[in-house]
Image (tube, helix red, strand yellow):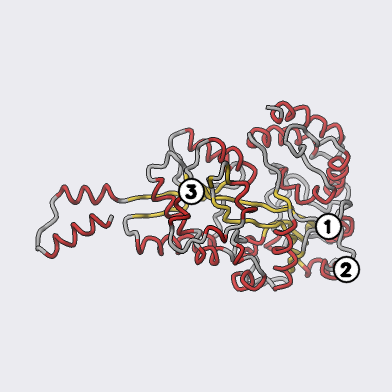
Amino acid sequence: MSQILSIRRAAALAGIALPLLATSVFAQDAVNLRMTLWTANEAHLKLFNEIADAYKANHPNVTVTFDSLPFDGYTTTLTTQIAGGNAPDLAWILETTAGDFVNSGALSPLKATFEATEGYDLADVTQSSLKLWSTDGEIYAYPFSTSPFGMFVNNDVIKAAGQKTPAEMIAAGEWNWQNAMAVNAAVAASGKQGLIVRDFDYKVWDNLASIWNGWGASPWSADGKTCTMTEQPMVDAMTFIHDAIFKQKAIPGPGVSADFFAGDAAMTITQISRASLLPKENPFSWDLVPLPAGPAGEYAVIGQAGIGVFANSKNPKEAADFLAFFTNPENSAKLAQFFPPARASLLNAEVLGKANPLLTPEQIEAVVVKGISTGVVKPGHAGFAEIQQTARAALDALWVADADVPAVLQSVCDRIQPLLAQ
């Protein structure tokens, strides 16, 4: 680009009109980058576009567009685009599919670009956050969000139902799943909804990890080769969830639409990036608390997301350079208001508090800082998309009132075990 600008500047000083050839060269120098993501949140996109505009100020030939895709089916849509020769230059990648993307050769190496970017300070990015996105010493995606799942609660509807708030239960040492679900059942009986596991919608079953980890359950063994959906912790956890849906009515049933952030429900499990959805007009009294303890004790679950550059991008060098700018220390601090950062220098209540004015230091310390330091990452697996869809189809039989929970979980293992063993 600088060469073209020099040509244009020199031509202007000499009073020479640019020939068509130069115009053509300038047009060829334009770089259009597309990043796919699963958020359409206006506040997120406003910040992303501000960062892209700041990058463009020093790279006027580069234009970045953010392509929001539906969360449900995001990876399928992304891989369809790749297969169809319409791969984006950069993409958000879920932790569940990190192994597939990192090990497939689809992503460009990034380490050299990060190390060469002035002021980037790659050493500040924690090794634990990079683990999922690296192999053989190379980095293939940047973990821009390491976000614990927490519980947003609507104290107004909880009090209206005559129940203790979660803060009161925490103070009394009573914050566990049995008590939490009893509150949700009482709120549901009062005419509102109880607990919403955001984005679950009886499709994204792996989001139930935010509950079943309280029972010490896991869908497969640590080496990923054996289905463990039929083991007692998972049977107990899924029975608890099934009872909460169909007996207690504490979780909205299939087909019931409710939005916690519109004031429809008592509680929702989600990540702090959703704090931007809290109503600014006619707000309700809300709180953010850790997940309730389960039979296995206190626990935390982390969702992680990376940004990768595709190897078959038309402009992988420029895409990697933009990613280095997007995730440099200054912009990471800005992104921290929605996405807990991977940089050690930013991972404390003081810094996160400045970036998250909606959250109190106590909420940040209890949910974010403690959650990141103690939480386990949501389950992922090579070939996750196929495993996820196969298990989802088998679990359809669970979402009816008279389901045989152990039998359904056995059918899940029967179907996904061959995929795990590959």
Residue 241 x, y percent position in the rendering: 83, 47
**Relative to the observer, which residue lies in front, 23 or 127?**
127
The residue positioned 53% from the left and 58% from the top of the image is 122
Give the residue at mark 3. Answer: 110
Give the residue at mark 1. Answer: 298
- Compared to 330, does 111 lie above or below? above
The residue positioned 67% from the left and 58% from the top of the image is 271
Image-quadrant location for residue 298: bottom right
User: Image quadrant for the N terminus?
Assistant: bottom left
Image-quadrant location for residue 422: top right
Secondary structure under the numbered disc 3 in the rendered image: loop
Badge 2 or badge 1: first in the primary sequence = 2
Q: State which mark lies toward you, 2 or 3.
A: 3
Residue 183 x, y percent position in the rendering: 86, 61
Characterize the local packing of mark 3: few (<14), some (14-19) or many (20 or more) Cα atoms within 10 angstroms.
many
Instruction: Give the amino acid type for the residue marked by disc 1 in the picture.
Output: Glu
The residue positioned 47% from the left and 54% from the top of the image is 114
Measured in 3D between alpha carbons, the distance from the residue under mark 3 to the one under mark 1, in whole angstroms, is 37 Å
Q: Is residue 64 left or right of residue 296?
A: left
Instruction: Give the amino acid type for the residue marked by disc 3 in the picture.
Output: Leu
Residue 162 got which mark?
2
Secondary structure under the numbered disc 2 in the rendered image: loop
Image-quadrant location for residue 250: bottom right
Characterize the local packing of mark 1: few (<14), some (14-19) or many (20 or more) Cα atoms within 10 angstroms.
some
Dot 2 and dot 3 residues touching (CB under 8 Å): no
Instruction: Give the amino acid type for the residue marked by disc 2 in the picture.
Output: Gly
